[in-house]
Image (spheres, grey):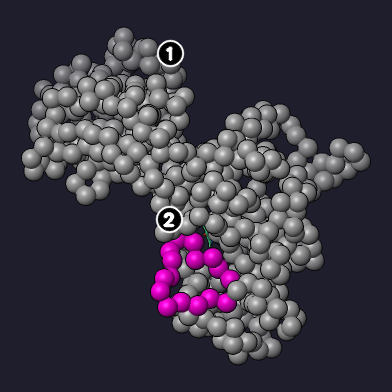
Amino acid sequence: MNPLSRLPSVDRLLSAAALSSLIELHGRAVVTATAREVLAATRAAFKQEAVLPAEDELIAKVGAGVTAKMTPKLRPVFNLTGTVLHTNLGRAPLPEEAVQALLTAARSPCALEYDIESGGRGDRDDIVNELLCELTGAEAATVVNNNAAAVFLLLNTLTPRKHVIVSRGELIEIGGAFRVPDIMQRAGAKLVEVGTTNRTHLKDFAEAITPRTAMLMKVHASNYAIQGFTHAVPEAELAELAHGKGLPFVVDLGSGTLADLARWGLPHEPTPAEAIAAGADLVTFSGDKLLGGPQAGLLVGRKDLIAKIKKNPLKRALRVGKLTLAALEAVLALYRDPDRLHLRVTAVRQLTRPEAEMRAAAMRLLPALQAALSGLPVTVEIVALKSQIGSGSLPVDRLPSAGFAIRPQGKRGGVLNRIEAALRGVAHPLRPVIGRIEDGALLLDLRCLDIADEPEFLASVAALGQPRC
Ligand SMILES: *Cc1c(COP(=O)(O)O)cnc(C)c1O
């Protein structure tokens, strides 16, 4: 007799108590499909190994398979990497006002492209146009999916088959494959590089202008700094040169905060208002970097140029939805009260959090972390750390912070990787904890751990228990 005929049927597996409760929870379809997959895999494995698992084992496999499928992929995590605006972890966490606005817009029909006063058709950009103009000093604004889309759309509208002059020192790559030269090429613009990597002068730009030139562009060198013997042309001089030749001057700011963060001890980051005041005709920046809002690309500047950009059919392909606009409007509104940004805009609050707060959190949390790691060949101590802003902002400056350093006793470094993986691997609905390994230590920077989230963090740590090291 074929031993495979001893395998239980799908129906028999589904009648097991453990699987009935999963059917109750998730429905019959997914449990049945998973049972079929497990049985097929078992038959395939039998051909190689000639052994059949016991029925209990099959049931456990089906259960684990269903649970894995039904765990959301977009899981919330604790960002203890020390990088506040972490692109791979979703950049800026939204302020509560934005979360509420987003939920309301999600649940209810809303006046997205509808003019309530006239009852006629509206323009979705009007939801944030006034706020953006007020906060940047621009004449008009439009919003697209992200800053890469904003740069693409502006080039595609204003420069097809014409030349864009950019300093060689600004031909940057932003993580996740945004390369200025590639975007230009795809947008149909021809890049003209001037100057050298470290020094570019006004005359380099002036000499490169020809009848085929469409614009002068400045790209904020977000994620790196050129130091030492350097020179870049100030925006006001580039604007004057461009305007003298009847050309627009455009600035891709990247992060572009709307407030002067220096008042909270952060380094000065150029603002769209400064670029506009210096004579820029268009400025683009991200919604989810220092601004602290949802993913979006904001374009502000001259009314005629914005109008032209909005007429490009690609605007329709790159536009944002109501959820983004709801969150963006709420975050921008917070900037009308610049004195309290450090309390109300989550990203700004995290960036300006005093070191003493992280140190106090470390003291509160240390005993639980020590208990969870007891019995493992590691030491845990509270250490001073340096957080980073992230997302290409202010690449050189680091923020004093505090947290934990977990170090192996002796030379067994492998234990760190196992703890790091276990912290990441806690089961849903617990939140994975993401730290960083640096100089032979697993570092957990507490800057982005809200006090209100500490109990949930402790639950993740407790679940760590004793990883098999
Ligand atoms: C971050 C950045 C971009 C890309 O912005 P996204 O919002 O991530 O699309 C483009 N240019 C500069 C200078 C940047 O810093």
- Coordinates of residue 22 in the picture (x, y in percent): 38, 16
Look at 59% across and 79% down and name the residue there.
Answer: 165
**What is the crowding at mark 2: few (fewer than 14 residues within 10 Å), some, or many (at least 20)?**
few
Q: Nearer the viewer, mark 2 or mark 1?
A: 2
Q: Nearer the viewer, residue 105 or 204?
A: 204
Q: Secondary structure at mark 1?
A: helix
Q: Is mark 1 within 8 Å of ligand 1?
A: no
Q: Is residue 29 above or below residue 166?
A: above
In the depicted structure, whether residue 42 falls above or below residue 90: above
Q: Is residue 290 left or right of residue 69?
A: right
Give the residues in magenta: 217-233
Residue at x 56% of width, y 86% of height: 204
Is residue 231 found inside the magenta-colored segment of the image? yes
Q: Quadrant of the C terminus?
A: top left
The residue type indicated by label 1 comes to Glu
Inspect the image, locate mark 2, and give the three-letter code of the amino acid beneath it: Asp
**Label of residue 397 in the image:** 2
Q: Tell me if I can see residue 437 in this picture.
A: yes
